[in-house]
Every structure is written in C-alpha cells, then in structure tokens.
C-alpha cells in the first residue's frame, strides 16, 4: 500500500490516538444489484481494512463508503491517499464501481447514467453491503471477511460531485436503510448551476497566481459577475444576454452579438482588457454536459440557461437537449433541495461539509454550493457542521504547526447559523497545500463523535 507523507501520517495518528497498524488487508468482491442490469447483475467492490485494530474506537473499525467525484467517473480501485490514510487510521474503506464502470479486470454490470437513479440504486446496495446487511456473490457479509468492522459506525465520504450522488441516495433510500450514520462531504456542488459552473470556474481565471479581484484568494477570479445571489435551490444569474456564436454559447455582455476573446478558439481568454477578472461588460461562456439518454448524445445545460435560450429565442441545434429534457436530467442529479429531503428521510445522519477559501471548482465568494446544502440539512433538523472542529484541525496539523491551530483558521461551531461571510468562515487555502488533512480529520471527528456520543457544538 502506498504510504502517506510522514508528517501527515504522524499527525493524524496522533489525532486518532492510534499506533500505525503493522499491516493492512484488502479484497475484491462482487455484490448483487438491480442497478447492474443489463449485464452481470453485480457491482465490483474493493475493501481495504486494518489487519490489527489499535485505536480509540474500542467497538471496532468504523466503516467508510466512498462516493466518487466527477461526472463521467464511474469509480476507481487505484491508489487513493485519503482512503489509504483512513485505513491507516483504523477505518474500513469500501469502494465500488458504478453501473457500467470498469477498472483493470474488475467491472460492474448495467449502464452508467451520469449519477441518476441507476447510480443511486448502486450506492444504496453498496451501503447495505458496507453496513453488513447484504452478502456478496460468495454469500459472505463484510463482517464475515473483516470481523473487527464496527457496523454501528458507518459513514460516507463524498468527494466533489460524489456529494449529490450520496445526498440523493440518502433522500431516496435513507428512510428504509436508516443509513448512513454520518456523511463527510468535500467541496460538493449543489444545484445544477454549480455543477455546470454557471456562476464561474477556476479555468476562466486569467492569472490564477494573482488575486485580481482583491478578495484575498488567488485563483478564483473566473467569476461570473452576472451572478448576484442564491435561494435554497437556485442561483440568481442574469442570462438576458445569452446568445450562440457558432459552437459557443455565452453571455454576450459587451453586446456585440458575437464571442469576444483573445487567443485561439481552442484556448480563449475572455479578459479582453487584461485586468485579471471577467468584467460585467466582458463575455462569459456557458457550459453543458454531454449525455446519451438513449436517443443520441446531446448537450445538457442548466435548467435556467436552457430556459433563457427559449425565452430569448436563441436558436439551438438538435445537439442541445430541450428545456424539458434538461429539467428532467437535473431532477435526479442535483443536490440543492435534496439535502432537506435526505435529512427528513434519515434524521440520524450527522453531516460535515468541508470547504476552503479556494475551491477546486467553485469561485463565488458566498459559496452557494456549501450554503444550499447546509441550509437543507439544517432545515431538516440534522446535526450539521461546516469544516472539522478546530481541535481536530489543530491536531491534524501538529506536525507542521507544533500543535497550534493554523493561523486564521475559523472555528465554526456545529449547528451554527449560516455565516454571513462564507470566505471568512472557510479554511484558509494559503495555510498549507493539500486538503487531505481536513478530510481525514473530518472523518475521524465524525467517527469519534458517534463512538463516544459527543454531539456538543464545540469540542
């Protein structure tokens, strides 16, 4: 197994109160799932576990199911620093391939549907297996294979776009399963407009090393200044200037009726005046996702962008999905709103949402993707927090900061009102490169809280 960097391992082992297990074990297996039809009817599963459990979790090794990020990503069994780190910290890690997915010689049956109902059904069945309530094709439960797994401490780690997948799975199946016990989400998008990045994205930043908009965060200057607010389920974006110029769909904010950019069409730069941001009078490109729904591959926009094209008479070719098709596509794939229904379905699920000043996809200062999900879980009455408790962050970083909490780190109490300054409440991205500390510390905190029944807002 690939080893974590020494400081990271030492700090987190100190955090978890464990000594490093002398060895780890793993196995591949298959589980039955109706989501894996047509085809084999089975999903490929990969489990890693500590051979010798020696930690503060006296009831056994907590189990964490991984919800993978990406849009076209169907999962991987390759090296993963976070999941391997969790195993070293005494967790059982469970991964699975989504329907139609393959990795090396392993594969899952079925057809990949871009994180819709086939994928949520697959995650339901993987969660049942992780919790010891389903057998694999050999007739064995996870407890038969890993006797020290604690099936009363089962969580989900949802990376990026794995957040909507996990949340929608809980919303659809959580009531019947009473699972998971906890959820840790890392920089998850929420509504379609955040998944598509209608509000801006890092790759539009003209100079990611320079803080051109003066908010203290370099790398987030690819903002769409036509975005001006959010509700629990949608973003308020002015699409009134939307046009199509050849293959480019854009907000024509300079009003010249065409896409205006510098550089070649394959690598356009929309910061025409060179001030390092996309001004309100400079064009902004609109993206979509390609998907074959059985009737051919078409481009799916956010519902709001697609409806604006209809309202403004923008002629789109048949390669674009219709407004109705876009609405149906996002109904089962976005997260905004579904976090509330997930919380209502599974009120015992405790939630942690992890985010930093510099997000890997989102650039809006008010972090609407985090706000929408957090407000939904809170409205449902679930225990929820923004980022790990400072006690866990400080210990996780002890190898670098000598035990002190990194400078500028906010300590958000659990169940706090949504912060008015979301950047101010975020983990300072410039403190250390890499976000593995936050995720590992977050999973350890959630498993600790469940193990010791400590749900006070501030540790």
Image (cartoon, rainbow, N blue to C red):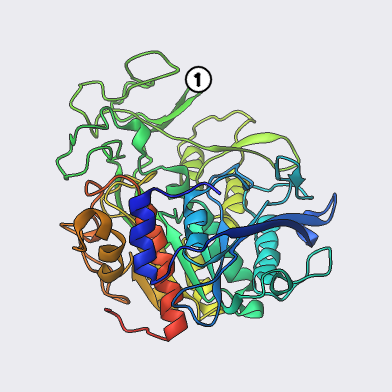
Instruction: In the rendered view, tell whether residue 180 sits above or below residue 20.
Output: below
Q: Kindly indicate the quadrant of the structure image that contains residue 150.
A: bottom right
Q: Is residue 381 visible?
A: no
Closest to the observer: 275 or 69?
69
Residue at the image point whose x is 50% and y is 82% from the top? 58
Where is residue 342 shown, x and y percent of the image?
53, 72
Q: Is residue 406 above or below residue 16?
A: above
Seen as rendered, the residue at the extreme top is 264
Q: Is residue 205 above or below residue 236?
A: above
| Image position of 356 (left or right of 369) | left
Residue 222: % across, % down: 30, 36
Give neighbour class at mark 1: few <14, some 14-19, many 20+ (Cα, 10 Å): few
Quadrant of image for the C terminus: bottom left
Whether residue 205 can be seen here: yes
Q: Which residue is mark 1?
A: 246
Q: Position of residue 445 (x, y in %)?
A: 39, 71
């Amino acid at each position: 197994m690939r080893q974590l960097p020494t400081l990271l391992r030492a700090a987190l082992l100190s955090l978890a109160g464990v000594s490093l297990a002398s060895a780890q074990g793993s196995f591949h297996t298959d589980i039955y799932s109706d989501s894996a039809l047509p085809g084999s009817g089975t999903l490929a599963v990969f489990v890693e576990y500590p051979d010798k459990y020696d930690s503060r979790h006296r009831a056994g090794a907590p189990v964490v199911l991984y919800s993978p990020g990406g849009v076209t990503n169907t999962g991987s069994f390759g090296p993963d620093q976070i999941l391997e780190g969790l195993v070293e910290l005494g967790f059982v890690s469970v991964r699975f391939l989504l329907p139609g997915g393959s990795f090396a010689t392993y594969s899952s049956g079925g057809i990949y549907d871009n994180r819709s109902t086939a994928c949520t059904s697959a995650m339901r069945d993987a969660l049942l297996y992780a919790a010891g309530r389903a057998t694999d094709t050999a007739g064995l439960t996870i407890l038969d294979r890993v006797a020290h797994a604690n099936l009363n401490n089962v969580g989900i780690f949802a990376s990026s776009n794995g957040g909507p997948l996990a949340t929608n799975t809980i919303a659809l199946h959580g009531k019947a399963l009473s699972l998971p016990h906890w959820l840790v989400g890392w920089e998850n998008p929420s509504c379609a407009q955040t998944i598509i990045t209608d509000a801006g994205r890092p790759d539009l930043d003209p100079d990611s090393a320079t803080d051109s908009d003066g908010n203290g965060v370099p790398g987030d200057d690819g903002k769409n200044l036509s975005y001006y607010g959010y509700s629990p389920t949608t973003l308020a974006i002015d699409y009134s200037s939307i046009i199509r110029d050849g293959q480019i769909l854009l907000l024509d904010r300079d009003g010249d009726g065409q896409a205006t950019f510098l550089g070649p069409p394959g690598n356009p730069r929309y910061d025409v005046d060179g001030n390092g941001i996309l001004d309100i009078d400079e064009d902004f490109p609109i993206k979509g996702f390609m998907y074959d729904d059985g009737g051919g591959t078409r481009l799916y926009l956010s519902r709001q962008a697609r409806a604006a094209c209809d309202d403004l008479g923008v002629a789109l070719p048949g390669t674009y999905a219709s407004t109705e098709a876009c609405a149906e596509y996002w109904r089962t794939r976005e997260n905004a709103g579904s976090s509330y229904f997930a919380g209502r379905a599974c009120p015992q699920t405790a939630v942690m949402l992890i985010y930093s000043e510099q997000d890997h996809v989102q650039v809006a200062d008010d972090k609407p993707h985090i706000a929408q999900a957090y407000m939904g879980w809170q409205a449902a009455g679930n225990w929820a927090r923004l980022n790990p408790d400072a006690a866990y962050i400080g210990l996780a970083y002890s190898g670098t900061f000598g035990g002190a909490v990194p400078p500028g780190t906010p300590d958000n109490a659990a169940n706090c009102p949504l912060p008015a300054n979301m950047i101010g409440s975020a983990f300072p991205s410039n403190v250390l490169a890499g976000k593995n500390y936050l995720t590992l510390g977050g999973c350890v905190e959630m498993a600790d809280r469940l193990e010791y029944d400590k749900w006070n807002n501030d540790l």
